Image: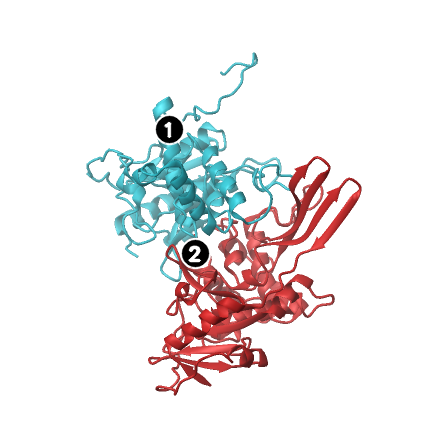
Amino acid sequence: MQINEPLTQQIREHAHRLLDGGEVECVIGYEIGPRGRARPAFVYGPTEVDRLIWGADCVHNLTTYLHDKKKPRKRGEEPPRVAVVVKPCDSRTLNILLAERQIARERVVAIGVACEGVVGKDGQPAAKCSRCTDRTPVVYDVLVGEPPEIPPVEDDWSDLARIEEMSPAERLSFWLREFDRCIRCYACRQVCPGCYCTTCMFERDDGLWVDAAIDVPQKHVFHLGRALHLAGRCVECDECERVCPMDLPLSLLNRLLVREVEALYGHRAGREETLTPLVFELGPEGSPI
Amino acid sequence: MRFTTLDGLRRWLDKLAEEVDLVAPTDVDGHVLYRPVQSADAILFDYERPELSAKDFLFPATEVLLRIEQKGKDVAIEEVLPDRKQVLFGIRPCDAHGLAVIDALFLEQDPPDRYYRHHRERTVLVGMACLQMWEGCFCTSMGGGPMDTTHLDVLIRPSEGGYFLQPVTPKGVAILEGLPVEEPKGEPPSVKEYNEPVPVVPPEKWRPLFNDRIWMRHGERCLSCRICTYVCPTCRCFDVTDRVVDVQPGLTRIERIRVWDACTSPNYRRVAGGHNPRPTKPDRLRNRFYCKFCYYPEDFGPLGCVGCGRCIVACPVDVDITEVMQDVAKQT
């Protein structure tokens, strides 16, 4: 893989400073595995920061690991303070997690990366990057790199065209064919920073909606349910689609809902620290706050 | 050793498809997967390692065990067992090795697993040799090999002019009876390229490493999904549940199903009262490796890994079983 040396160096310097000064317990970044693949890395000491790298293969959205850092290590202690490397798309997740009170702002140091785009499974520029207009993260504490001058491209939703040309019956058969390949491994759910229920409703022992069978009806309900639970919350990092071993086009489901929510509420998830308009908190009088 | 051309092989398979449940490697929307086929037209003859193992056809991801029908006070229970003969064509030697590993628990313990035994008895394993090792493959380190015949009924070796078929068992001899045989053209091929071997540490040397920091290092990035266990030819954990499939006035139909389960999943080890003795990702990932290299061989005999490399290629966060094995070897 291609390593971006200047950005790698800057990330290591920030990681060293944060760990050496005791500002954070852990830096979540990227390293290279023995097979040359980029992967998430957890660095706990200043002597280990040389493991960290940056390059176009650093596609993973590392904010999903913040859920593992929410609990204190010992009862009575504060949860650990951690640093996390974020691309612009990943940083939108931080806004979701902050708005949903999953993390406290002061417990996270966001090392933002000015992003030129990352590559997808096929080694080509990732689809999500072709429509991304953010050159710097929307939330960060320190920024590495210079924002590249890439002209913004308007999201024309052209990826959804192939679905929209279909009749309802054709759409159903398209999706059932896709869901048929699903192996119900839950990788899409597990990787998603927005999927953090302690017990997933599709995996309950007493589940009323789906039973445990790995068959098309259960997979159908799971995938539609998963997408709906992310309506107005999905930041389009496309991690669910990347991790799918059967290449289900899950971003199509997500983006159909993204467009609906934007059209109805003018809301695009993660741009600001706000909750999805599809959920609201009830005040004392039972009315939305 | 018998020899036939691609055309001969196809004619034989077309005939088989009429008589048995035939399963073979197919192209499913760009993925190489074993699937039931109706004729040779759907079968891939030149393919890499299929992305999922063949265990699904002996230990199905979802299997109906019992059908229960309740009418008033009358309850009728029917056991569900398919009776047609099944031929798994084109499986890789590692797939057959994986079944031999599962046999140690499901067949060789008392009592054996009734359903698995039934599938095993009705199935003939016709393997296709690998002419090379694929990305992540390390079968040669686990006692197998790209042309290993040990656990197969027939091994096929593709060559330039056709296919060399070697019956290994009486079942294999019988299934080849209808094969149109020709004069061999050329010699049977050999393996072009081997991957680097991986060190295998014996079970007793794993025990002292239970609290080693390598589990945190490998497990912390794990997503706790089920990909590695579901693509694995030896992972065999399951769950059993009942589901209501039909309710009418005076009549309820229920199915008892068995479905795959995965020790990497957060819910897997949860017990009554909600306690979970493997609460974190490293706890769970460690269990997966200990099962393969320590618990399973100690309890049932064979190592729980055949070196097929599928989990390495499929893992979205680069958890690599060979890297773990090397780290364990370094510590011992």
Taking depth in this image into account, of A210 and A254 the one nearest to the observer is A210
Q: How is the image coloured?
A: by chain
Residue B222, percent from left and from top: 49, 51
| Chain letter for mark 2 | B
Q: Quadrant of residue A21?
A: top left
Residue projecting furthest to the top: A285
Residue on which disc 1 sits: A260
Residue A103, percent from left and from top: 48, 33
- Is A266 situated above or below A127? above
Taking depth in this image into account, of A151 and A11 the one nearest to the observer is A151
- Is B92 situated above or below A162? below
Q: Residue at x 35, y 60 (%)?
A: A36
Element at badge 1? Answer: helix
Chain ID for red: B
Q: Amino acid at mark 2?
A: Asp
Q: Residue at x 40, y 27 (%)?
A: A273
Q: Residue at x 43, y 53 (%)?
A: A245
Q: Residue at x 51, y 44 (%)?
A: A219
| Relative to A108, B57 lies left or right | right
Residue B199, percent from left and from top: 50, 72
For the question of whether residue B191 can be seen, the reply is yes
Q: Colour of chain A?
A: cyan
Taking depth in this image into account, of A27 and A161 the one nearest to the observer is A161
Q: Amino acid at mark 1?
A: Glu
Residue on which disc 2 sits: B318
